[in-house]
Amino acid sequence: MSSEFDIIRRYFTRPTHRAILGIGDDAALIPYTATADLAISTDTLVSDQHFFADTDPGKLGHKALAVNLSDMAAMGAIPRWVTLALTLPANLANRNSSWLEVFMDGFFTLASKYEVELIGGDTTCGPLNISVHIIGEVAKGKALKRSGAMPGDDIWLSGYLGNAALALAHLQQRITLKPDELTVCLAALDAPVARIELGQRLINLAHSAIDISDGLLADLGHILECSQVAATIHLGKIACSGVMQRYLPLSVAVDCLLAGGDDYELCFTAPVIKRSEIAQLSQELSIPLTRIGTISQGKGLFLLDVNDNTITHEKKGYDHFLT
Amino acid sequence: MSSEFDIIRRYFTRPTHRAILGIGDDAALIPYTATADLAISTDTLVSDQHFFADTDPGKLGHKALAVNLSDMAAMGAIPRWVTLALTLPANLANRNSSWLEVFMDGFFTLASKYEVELIGGDTTCGPLNISVHIIGEVAKGKALKRSGAMPGDDIWLSGYLGNAALALAHLQQRITLKPDELTVCLAALDAPVARIELGQRLINLAHSAIDISDGLLADLGHILECSQVAATIHLGKIACSGVMQRYLPLSVAVDCLLAGGDDYELCFTAPVIKRSEIAQLSQELSIPLTRIGTISQGKGLFLLDVNDNTITHEKKGYDHFLT
């Protein structure tokens, strides 16, 4: 079986001429005005892959947009317009079903918050499939790419990783959370918060950025590959939620922390000289921003335990075609 | 059961502010440069709804893009960039399967022809679902909308209608075509030609336009609704392919002609004064352009037979949630 990224490289990637940036980042870039580029991205949620078929439609409407907003955040872009390609089983489109109304309420509530306009789409009948396409504006030539990491850069993380994956592990009966822990973790899984404002504020501070949708190791790995650099990260420095702290170092929790998807936090790299500005930004936005490691020359992602011993972690992250 | 258009009106349509044109036309419009707007559209193909699961993947790759190019044609836009949200069953993404390679060959062959760049997408695992998002450029303020039809306008059609629907009727054993007829009709079904150049040349000639994806009556109906006008069309004036002529007036053929989807011809309205320019354009592009009726004040779509008697046609066109 091919991995998702093999597939992208082999079959989809061709040189572009009119676009500033094509396939391979959180969003593509095309020229827009004298002061802005357009960032363009698409993310699909598939029933039984990204969510359970009986997921509350309002939460699904929120999440379908949130995962796309997160791609804008990772580029430092201001989200502006979306289209929605929605394939629905006939029973959900039935007049007697409130599914669509509740789904769109969740979608529009989040869209209104960021003044994002739904300008088009396509509604078709078939197995549930939700594809959102998003267009945002980003300062000309300033978008945060995966390819900008430089040796010496600090590696930063926003918020806490792994709560969404802990909720999924609970639902899949791989771990048993207490009711109050489950509530916290389900909120992370169902209603992720895209780091829109943080992304925009990281322009001129960060050298590179990505959103954590497939897991820290996988997504940081994309930065390393695109930037052709290596990284060392300190497991003990990764900021953990209270719930995560309680379950570490259970291997299922370590998996959730390092390779759990669906967090939608930002991982970014920035020069050492920007540390105090980033710390100030963290305070201003009330978002934990934590330094977890360093970029270096070379190739590879090295993980150190609290005694600075190298450890290996086999599970790299979520892959649609390998998992 | 709600119709697709009820669903769009009820759940998706909200006022837009930053966009020039939101939901309800062949594409949305957003401001771009001093001389151009961007036209944005998305069209999804779902297995067993829009195509048979065993359809040749190369033809599917062509068609997934062609139906989106057709939306650009209907706006008079030059297609520039596309993204591809592709949900694939695991067996089609397998290294031993050539499905994806052949699909992308079909896609890129057509993309190259129009210099359209694939700049992004999302590849996920699940029931086959192909959603293409397209962005094009159109002369500022000049896009061909559904809402521009004026009383007195001629109603024009490009090419021949119904061949794609005849092929489908044959595959569904509702009609039996001869082998040579089937070849002609299958080409229309599998490899539709988007009227890209025609669309662009209709700017400053046509008042309104739409592409025929759901059937003439349904799609012309959208122009009438958006423009708040009525239309009279003459059944005998609709240009028919040789195959169609042989099967008329069988009711299944009349259905294909008036309510068959998948033709991707353009239906447009233009003032009488433009007749000679349009005739000249038809010659220049070697595309039949035929006047089939007239726009008038009021409401309704009136269909006249060769003796100018009003006839009724119950089947209006393809609807994902009613068919």
Image (cartoon, coloured by chain):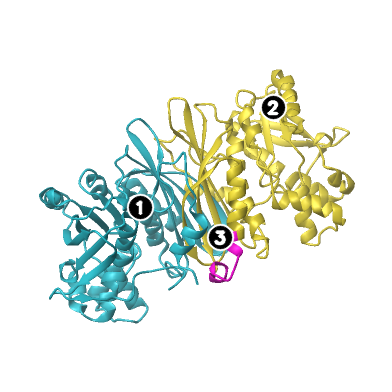
Chain colours: A cyan, B yellow
Q: Amino acid at mark 1?
A: Asp
Q: Residue A265 versus residue A268: which sits nearer the camera? A: A268
Q: Is residue B240 above or below residue B142?
A: below
Label 1: state its secondary structure.
helix
**Amino acid at circle 2:** Ser
Q: Is residue A267 magenta?
A: no
Q: CA distance from mark 3 to mark 1?
A: 22 Å
Task: Write the residue at 59% across / 34% down.
Answer: B146
Mark yes or no: residue A31 visible: yes
Q: Amino acid at mark 3?
A: Asn
**x then y, percent, for residue B197:** 64, 33
Is residue B92 found inside the magenta-colored segment of the image? yes
Instruction: Identify the mark at residue A71; answer none if there is no mark.
Output: 1
Q: Residues within 10 Å of mark 1 (few under 14, many from 20)?
A: many
Identify the residue at horizontal 81%, vertical 59% (top origin): B174
Q: Nearer the viewer, residue A221 or B290?
A: A221
Expressed as whole percent of the image width and height from the top left, the position of residue A88 reads: 54, 60
Name of the residue lying farthest toward the front: A298
In the image: residue B273, left or right of residue A33 = right
Q: Are marks 1 and 2 on the same chain?
A: no
The magenta region covers B90-101
In the foreground, A85 or B116: B116
Residue ID for mark 3: B129
Q: Nearer the viewer, mark 3 or mark 2?
A: 3
Label located before the other in sequence (3 or 2): 3
Residue A96, can we see it?
A: no
Residue B296 has which mark? 2
